[in-house]
Image (cartoon, rainbow, N blue to C red):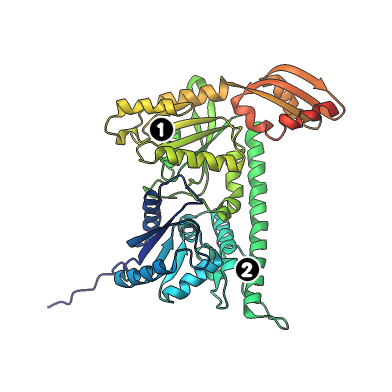
Amino acid sequence: MSKRIPQPTTPPHEKAFLVGVDLYQHKSFLALEDSLAELALLADTSGLDVAGELTQKLDRPHVKTYIGPGKVDELKMLVEETRAQVVIFDDELSPRHQRELQEALGRNVRVLDRTALILDIFAQHAHTKEGMLQVELAQYEYYLPRLTGQWTHLERQAGGGGGRSGATGGVGLRGPGETQLEVDKRAIRRQIAHLKKELEKVSAHRQRYRAQRKRSRVPTVALVGYTNAGKSTLLNKLTKSDVYVADQLFATLDPTTRRVELPGGYQALMTDTVGFIQKLPTTLIEAFHATLEEILEADLLLHVVDISHPNALNQFNAVQQTLDELGAQRIPIVTALNKMDRLRDPQNARAVVERYPKAAAISSLKGSGIPELLHLIQAELYETYTPIHVRLPYQQGALISLFHEAGQVERVEHGRGGVVMQGRIPGRLVAQFIGWEVAGKHRQLEEEL
């Protein structure tokens, strides 16, 4: 009788217990239960199984443990009952909160927050050198203030493997009177400085590439939207390409640019960007600056909204807030209300379009509504003119010429340092004049010319 060869098995997922706090002081775009549902999706994307959740309403976070002492005891009991190995808080914890909770729950349970979970997902999904550098930098900056006396060898953890950026890393010789913790922090600060220099090179390369694209006079469209709204699927449909697509949060991190044909023989370059999410960690926004520049340098933003999601409007507002924080208010926006095929009554749902500015109802999967969307993009880029009032130094001769060639000039005033121009320009050119606008209290600059 032949022996049965044992088959390899997939190791069981770790169990995670979720904790959400409804703070009176801080209201997010999503209700607590919806925010926890999103946290559960993040945990699933990270490879964790959710074992349960605990919530509490508070005026403000508890000074030591974020949740109240009684809730900490309850949490400890529930974690033991469910045998959860990880506890994840829906908000970012301060280093003290994390330290006190870790001590209360014991060494066998890891305490994470939403930021750490998103960083873990980014580490799994970053595949290009740029993406890996960005994630590694964000991880180091997040963990630096959270270091304790026990060295956690972050140079092996950050970015899913450390050392990938070429830095020597490691811990150097200890100076007189230095503790191990001080040496560890100094080593991490050196690594952070190295990563920032590497990303500056990436940013410079992107800037040269964007300058090349602008010289070609082909406008660029940046796809933005809440994570898992269907941006990559739409990019594939519009450009007939094969960008990686998965039905999970943050499936793609690295920007991809493709050419798209517009009605009337026009063309545009379309770039997919990292998805947004409520409570997007500041460390990630800072670390992904080179990638997010693609948004700020775009001629048009195409905001993709999952209209089938019960919190579509809240997600729309969360993205708009992030765009405002990035400084993208002046860039024209077209909205694609995606996943119409998932709605029970798409005909009635089309009335929703009226709630969104410059919107088209589409299904990127089925292809419905795509011609209308392309016409909307073409009109915004080539037919819609935006009022503008700028002060341009004479050194910006290219922009002055561009205004005269492509715009409708209503007023020109020459002065000592430059020229004030007022009129209208095509929507696709607005981004190139950002930073030169004359508005409000700055109108006095005109008098100095």
Query: At which x and y percent is residue 328?
Result: 60, 37
Callout 1 crowding tier (Cα within 10 Å): few <14, some 14–19, many ≥20:
many
**Amino acid type, mark 2:** Ile
Residue farthest along the front direction in this orientation: 59
Examine the image and state in which quarter residue 230 appears: top left
Residue topped by disc 1 = 337
User: Vertically, is 446 above or below 27?
Assistant: above
Query: At which x and y percent is residue 189?
Result: 66, 66
Secondary structure of the residue carrying tag 2 is helix
Residue located at (65% from left, 37% from top): 212
Towards the viewer: 241 or 33: 33
Towards the viewer: 138 or 243: 138
Secondary structure of the residue carrying tag 1 is strand
Residue topped by disc 2 = 188
Is residue 298 left or right of 361 when viewed as pictured?
right
Q: Quadrant of the C terminus?
A: top right
Towards the viewer: 222 or 4: 222
Residue 224 appears anywhere in the view: yes
In space, the residues marked 2 and 1 are separated at their CA atoms by 44 Å
User: Vertically, is 254 above or below 220?
Assistant: below
Residue farthest along the bottom direction in this orientation: 176
Residue located at (66% from left, 43% from top): 207
Examine the image and state in which quarter residue 233 appears: top left
Callout 2 crowding tier (Cα within 10 Å): few <14, some 14–19, many ≥20:
many
Query: At which x and y percent is residue 169?
Result: 62, 70
